[in-house]
Image (tube, rainbow, N blue to C red):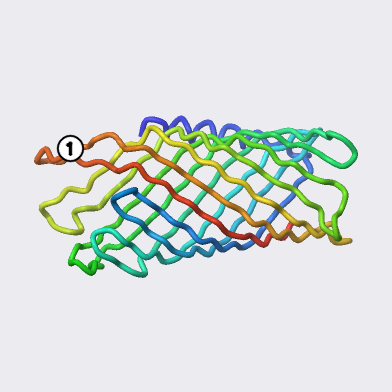
């Protein structure tokens, strides 16, 4: 992929410069979500994901750098060429962010940021057959993107909790869809489809309870959305054209996080 080497180089270069004397916050947690993936007029998958999430944040002089990662898995139900239930799915996401904290007044602070992100999804219906006799196959989606967002924090407690909200726009850099059609029949090739256009956004609302030992517990409902346009057309070995259709992904869930 044309952006992959550059992306990895920039990502690693930036995070190799973490200040050794910066204040460090480590957050670990779990989350669950309902997700719906739709290719309009083609197919739809719905399911529940459960996973783990974590972050490391370095703070120094009002500036911050953070590294965030999550992994989840679950099962999806497919409706399209017939129906297939309980398709294994897994999603992995990692991103690095750079930003600065600004105190708007005694009660509010604003933290704008930007960074680089990577999202991987695996949907594996290989070996499964739909209600109409269509065979399933394994699919992989890879997104490279630039998160641009801000976090708004309320410093004064409300009913014992500190409140914060986070809004993020995800600028889509490049994507790739790998469809292992050869699992259906030897008459098909495995296909790689390049995706150049799309966008995403996400927002969350966090309720944080601080403890005397410096740790805190956060409950955070969230929503995530992706829209990706039609891929470029790829031709197989016998000149058949293939395309990944325009699609969108909607995910709503909740996280439980412990900061140390």
Q: Height in image: 131 above or below 247?
A: below
Q: Residue at x 44, y 56 (%)?
A: 36
Label 1 packing within 10 angstroms: few (<14), some (14-19), many (20+)? some
User: Left of 155 or right of it: where is 243?
Assistant: left
Q: Position of residue 48 (x, y in %)?
A: 48, 65
User: Which image quadrant for residue 74?
Assistant: bottom left
Q: Nearer the viewer, residue 239 or 1?
A: 239
Residues 195 and 211: in front is 195
Q: Quadrant of the N terminus?
A: top left
For this view, does 120 lie left or right of residue 50?
A: left
What residue does disc 1 label?
235
Pick the quarter of the image with the C terminus: bottom right
At horizontal 41% and vertical 66% (from top left) the residue drawn is 75
Q: In the image, residue 148 lies at what x, y percent? A: 60, 34
x and y percentages locating residue 126 in the rendered image = 26, 63
Q: Quadrant of residue 80?
A: bottom left
* Vertical position of residue 22 compared to residue 122: above or below: above
Q: Nearer the viewer, residue 159 or 75?
A: 159
At horizontal 58% and vertical 61% (from top left) the residue drawn is 52
Give x and y (percent) for residue 87.
35, 65
Q: Is residue 39 left or right of residue 23?
A: left
Q: Which SS class for mark 1?
A: strand
């Amino acid at each position: 992929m044309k952006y992959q080497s550059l992306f990895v180089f920039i990502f690693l270069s930036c995070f190799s410069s973490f200040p050794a004397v910066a204040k460090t916050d480590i957050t670990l947690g779990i989350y669950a979500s309902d997700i719906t993936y739709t290719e309009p007029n083609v197919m739809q998958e719905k399911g529940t994901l459960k996973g783990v999430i974590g972050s490391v944040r370095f703070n120094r002089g009002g500036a911050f750098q953070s590294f965030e990662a999550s992994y989840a898995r679950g099962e999806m139900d497919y409706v399209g060429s017939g129906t297939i239930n309980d398709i294994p799915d897994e999603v992995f996401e990692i991103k690095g962010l750079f930003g600065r904290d600004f105190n708007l007044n005694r009660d509010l602070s604003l933290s704008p940021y930007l960074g680089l992100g990577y999202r991987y999804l695996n949907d594996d219906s290989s070996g499964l057959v739909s209600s109409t006799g269509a065979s399933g196959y394994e699919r992989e989606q890879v997104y490279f993107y630039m998160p641009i967002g801000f976090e708004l924090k309320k410093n004064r407690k409300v009913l014992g909790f500190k409140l914060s909200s986070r809004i993020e726009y995800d600028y889509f850099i490049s994507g790739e869809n790998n469809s292992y059609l050869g699992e259906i029949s030897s008459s098909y090739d495995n296909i790689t489809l390049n995706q150049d256009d799309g966008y995403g956004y996400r927002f969350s609302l966090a309720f944080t309870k601080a403890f005397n030992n410096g740790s805190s517990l956060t409950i955070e409902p969230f929503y995530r959305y992706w829209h990706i346009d039609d891929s470029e057309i790829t031709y197989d070995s016998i000149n058949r054209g293939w395309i990944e259709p325009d699609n969108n992904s909607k995910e709503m869930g909740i996280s439980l996080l412990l900061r140390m």
